[in-house]
Amino acid sequence: MTIDELAFFLATHSYRSEPKPDHVLVDLPGGIEAYLTPNGASPGLADFWKSPPKSTGPVRTLAEDAIQRNASYDEAPPTGELAEFTRSRLLFPVTPLGMCYDGSRKLDDSYSAYGYRVMYMYDPSEWDWQGHLWVVVEAPEYPDAWIAVDSYYGIMRIDDYYSAPYSFDDMKYLDYINPRWRLM
C-alpha cells in the first residue's frame, strides 16, 4: 500500500488524512495528530508516529507476483496419489461451515507436511461479507494440474473452484487484499 492509498483508505473510513511525501498526517478524535506510514509486510496496516518520520526511501513490501489476480488452474482428474491422500488422510469437514479461513490453513498444513504444493484461492464477493477461501493442490502425477479442496466439502469438481479473483501461496497475503485496522 502506498502513502496515497493509505490516505485514501483512511478518508473512506471518516478520518481526515493528508498524504505527505514520507507519511500520512491524520487527525484523530480529541484533536490529536498522528503520522502514519504503510508498514509493508509487518502485521497491521500502518505504523503510528508521534512526530513526522524520516524518509527511508522506497521499500518493496512484497514480490509483484505474490498475489495472482484472476488466476485459473487446470483441474486434475480425481484419481491418483493426491486424490487418494485427500480421501484417506483428511476428515471432512475440517472445520465448521463458515470457518474457511481456519479450514484452509489446516488443509495447507496437512498437504504441505507431505510435500504437496498449495495455493490459496480467495473470492471476496461483497464488501459486507467475508468472502470465501479454499485451496488448490498441485497433483504431482499431472503436471500443472490441480485439485480444488474446500475445508467443509472436500474435493470440488465445480469449475468455480478452479479460478478466483485472488490466489497466493501464503496466508499472510490475505491481509494485503483485505486490510484491517490493528492497534498494537
Image (cartoon, rainbow, N blue to C red):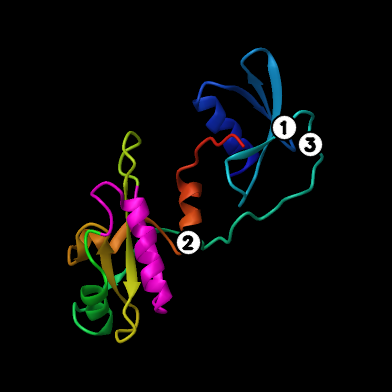
Q: Earlier in the sequence, mark 1 or mark 2?
A: 1
Residue range highlighted in magenta: 94-123
Q: x, y percentage for residue 154? A: 21, 64
Secondary element under disc 1, as helix, strand or loop, is loop
Q: CA distance from mark 1 to mark 2?
A: 32 Å
For the point 35% across and 36% down, the residue is 127
- The answer, for residue 121, to whether it is visible in the render is yes
Secondary element under disc 2, as helix, strand or loop, is loop
For the point 53% across and 35% down, the residue is 181
Which quadrant of the view contains residue 117? bottom left
Question: Mark 2 belongs to which amino acid?
Answer: Asp
Kindly identify which residue carries mark 2: 170
Residue 112 within the segment the image draws in magenta: yes
- The answer, for residue 76, to whether it is visible in the render is no
Q: Nearer the viewer, residue 93 or 138?
A: 93
Q: x, y percentage for residue 51? A: 79, 29
Q: Is residue 119 above or below residue 144?
A: above
Q: Is residue 184 left or right of residue 174?
A: right
Kindly identify which residue carries mark 3: 53
Query: Which disc is residue 20 wearing?
Result: 1
For the point 19% across and 77% down, the residue is 78
Judged from this view, the residue extending furthest toward the right is 54
Secondary element under disc 3, as helix, strand or loop, is loop
The reply to whether callout 1 and callout 2 are in contact (CB within 8 Å) is: no
Q: Is residue 156 left or right of residue 179?
A: left
The reply to whether callout 1 and callout 3 are in contact (CB within 8 Å) is: no
Characterize the local packing of mark 2: few (<14), some (14-19) or many (20 or more) Cα atoms within 10 angstroms: some
